[in-house]
Image (cartoon, rainbow, N blue to C red):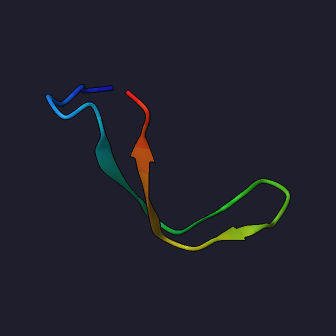
């Protein structure tokens, strides 16, 4: 994963369905990198 000078980067996670049928809404998560 690309690292930024600030050390944190927000990643867009699109909505998806897990294999067990769980729906995951689209969201943003910050990486600890």
Q: Which quadrant of the view contains residue 29? A: bottom left
Left or right for 32, reference 10: right
Q: Nearer the viewer, residue 29 or 19?
A: 29
Q: Position of residue 14 (x, y in %)?
A: 44, 64
Q: Which quadrant of the view contains residue 28? A: bottom left
Q: What residue do we see at 28% from left, 43% from top?
A: 9
Q: Quadrant of the C terminus?
A: top left
Q: What residue do we see at 81% from left, 66% from top?
A: 21
Left or right for 15, reference 20: left
Q: Quadrant of the N terminus?
A: top left
Q: Position of residue 6 (x, y in %)?
A: 19, 34
Q: Position of residue 12 (x, y in %)?
A: 36, 58
Left or right for 1, reference 5: right
Q: Nearer the viewer, residue 30 or 16?
A: 30
**1 up-or-down from 21: above or below:** above
| Count of all numbered marks drawn on residues in the image | 0
Left or right for 18, reference 11: right
């Amino acid at each position: 994963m690309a690292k930024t000078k600030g050390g944190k980067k927000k990643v867009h996670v699109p909505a998806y369905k897990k294999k067990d049928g769980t729906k995951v809404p689209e969201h943003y998560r910050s990486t600890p990198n």
